[in-house]
Image (cartoon, coloured by chain):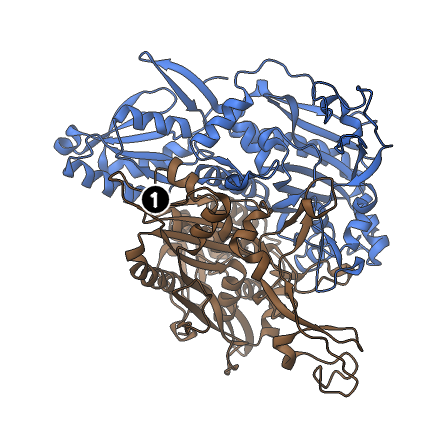
Chain colours: A blue, B brown
Amino acid sequence: MSEAPPTEVTLDEIVSLCRRRGFVFPSSEIYGGLGSTYDYGHYGVLAKNNIRSLWFRAMVQERDDMVALDSAVILNPAVWEASGHVGGFTDPLVDCRTCKLRFRADKLEDAACGRKPSKRPGETPDCDLTEPRQFNLMFKTQVGALEDESSAAYLRPETAQGIFVNFKNVLQLARRKPPFGIAQVGKSFRNEITPGNFLFRMREFEQMEMEFFVPPDEAEQWYRYWIDERVAWYRKYGLRDSHLRVREHTPEERSHYSSGTSDLEYLYPIGWSELEGVANRGDYDLTQHTQHSGTKLEFVGEGGERYTPHVIEPAVSIDRILLAYLVDGYDEEVVAERQRTVLRLHPALAPVKAAVLPLIPRNGDMVERARALHDELRRRHMVEYDDGGQIGRRYRRQDEIGTPFAFTIDEQTLEDDTVTVRDRDSLAQERLPLGSVAAWLDQALERPWSSPKA
Amino acid sequence: MSEAPPTEVTLDEIVSLCRRRGFVFPSSEIYGGLGSTYDYGHYGVLAKNNIRSLWFRAMVQERDDMVALDSAVILNPAVWEASGHVGGFTDPLVDCRTCKLRFRADKLEDAACGRKPSKRPGETPDCDLTEPRQFNLMFKTQVGALEDESSAAYLRPETAQGIFVNFKNVLQLARRKPPFGIAQVGKSFRNEITPGNFLFRMREFEQMEMEFFVPPDEAEQWYRYWIDERVAWYRKYGLRDSHLRVREHTPEERSHYSSGTSDLEYLYPIGWSELEGVANRGDYDLTQHTQHSGTKLEFVGEGGERYTPHVIEPAVSIDRILLAYLVDGYDEEVVAERQRTVLRLHPALAPVKAAVLPLIPRNGDMVERARALHDELRRRHMVEYDDGGQIGRRYRRQDEIGTPFAFTIDEQTLEDDTVTVRDRDSLAQERLPLGSVAAWLDQALERPWSSPKA
């Protein structure tokens, strides 16, 4: 994370919109919450569903070289010994013997002394800090009825290891040979000591990871390929070029097993930060699991050639993608002397695709036609019917949740069977025959879209 | 679970098919596995995605009275105090001081003595069983850097409580009033002492729960309504009537707070067992959380009326639904003197909607047209291209994973631009113009379907 440059929207504004419109709530709020844990409300769930299914479509459905996997959260603990997580997935912590608080030794500049919060730990005479010790970030639990070390297990801190331990199953049973990939979506858990920044760093988050297994001499080429593919995916769904960059890790930053890692960084309100990582993991993972499990995780070709594939991994969380698109799409403008807040989301990402609004909610004929249109449209799309309040207020509610189109049933509809369609971004209105709305919406949702702010 | 009646397919046959075709693998297999934990392979993921999205469509997209939620797995532990899980979500366990094994006190008849496995615990002279003690089924962990009781937390054993603690958020921010529901899909975790029966009882499973909040005097009527709705949903996707029944719990079976619970039971190979539960939970949950949190969870109408809503809950896991449909659809028959295994799944549930097969894989023209058709169809559906082996073998591979349609590109295609479509169930073949295949498939997937075995 680098220094924070000026951005157009603050994290507080995003948090406020998310809470106000039911995208995201602090978790367990009526019990005082739980640090850095959030619950997704209605529109948050719908947006996440869109992100998940668009990722899955691009990574699995539209490709020949990919299979899906959904491995367990609690794996055999030997997996985490082999992967190096038991030994090395740690942060250095120090305790203060005076104020009894615990801090990350490498982040003391961001911490506040427990007795004098204006000072950082170590800056006041009565601070008494211990030497740093390593704290493992995996959540530990116990499986089975015995409460001792023999039953210890961990919640996965990443989905990737579930993929590696299934490599042989996929090779054999899905009849695959490199290059091919295994894609997985699911929750991961990290007992972060200093989580924060809303959806950016949470203790539980929904990962989308893909491990792409390739012949060793093709690793560099596929590493570049996946960086380009993932950048193209974000662009396709309208993320602004000026807010997205690729930053290659320096050799010092990289994990010891990595021969190349690039972050796709987004210009979050906290500054340029990792949205997605693409790593060339070499043969580290398959080699480790071969050594620890005694099962050879290698590819043997029909001609007898034999090698341990190298692995390219694009890894991201749905939560960070959602946060990036919320920031990217957030806009405020004054229209007809009134301020409106609008989420300029790509229609494919928008939680609700269209609103159906009877202009005069007490007019039975309008309501009847609006209901019929709503029933027709929601067979194929997430669509909302709203008859609550002035039409301007209803438009603004839809703007705030990013609904790209609104169909209004008015007096003229009762005369000539046409409706008004209002465009969220341009505010242009046009009339369409009622009977053609469903087909019009199908097409409109497929049109390329780019941010009017770009 | 009642006595096992004769069924057509054994659990072993289902397990074998699932492993052979990559629906489900034992988890962490290369490390010896982890009891009652499974990883879903490619076709398992696709089938689960279908179940999840069909449930979501019926419960949320097609209704006016429902919102979605995705709450955290690790909630503030006070939630589980209030819900009664810390105190009462337990099984009684006994230890044997001789063989050092631990057993469920209420299931001793199913257990084997650690020294003489032909006997049950307590039946041999040297068994030395302790008194039963209560063992909590929630997985425990610790949040934050301190390892003491103050940081103890639990993995949720059900998604429902995350819904109850968000009741007020939804009421206020989604402008809802009873009757309305909150629907959620997500993993739950139970440290079962005697899990088993494949996907039927796992330590982690993906729940789909919905809590429907109603005025107290409408509870009974909505309880009946939701039983009927859920039965209709299973029927719509072709589950055989003869394998599905509704069994109302006796007053002795019910939870103390329930004023009515019905199981939708399916005839699994282990006998009639709970597929889905529909419970009338009364005002128990909202009252408990009001008392423990100090936040009033009640509905206040515009006219000032005020009440604690009653709750109707249909709760099921995707895993049990998948297992039911796999059992229901599994069939073996002899066709042209060859045995075939076929999964007769409703097309909406089938992992792959269609296969595209070039009859002669080394014929470049056939391959080119097959590839083009495949590219066209997979824009909208999960479709497989297969050019491996004899055409009969390829058909059988698709039959085993339940693919309803196969399109074959053959000599005649090159002459007149028609393809053969083969129906999985009837084995009927007909020819279609190549250009009409996409529209034909769209329609075919929407047609009502019922099991030919019914």
Residue B454 image offset from top left, x and y in percent = 39, 74
Residue drawn where x is 68% and y is 50% of the image: B141
Along the viewing direction, whichever of B364 and B199 lies nearer the viewer: B199
Quadrant of the snapshot with the N terminus of chain A: top right
Query: Quick check: can you spot residue A23?
Result: yes
Along the viewing direction, whichever of B97 and A328 lies nearer the viewer: B97
* Amino acid of disc 1: Phe
Q: Which chain carries label 1?
A: B
Residue drawn where x is 45% and y is 74% of the image: B252
**Residue to which mark 1 is pinned:** B299
Residue B306 image offset from top left, x and y in percent = 31, 45
Along the viewing direction, whichever of A370 and B398 lies nearer the viewer: A370
Looking at the rendered structure, the secondary structure element under dot 1 is strand
Q: In which quarter of the image is residue B144?
A: top right
Residue A343 image offset from top left, x and y in percent = 44, 25
Query: Quick check: can you spot residue B416?
Result: no
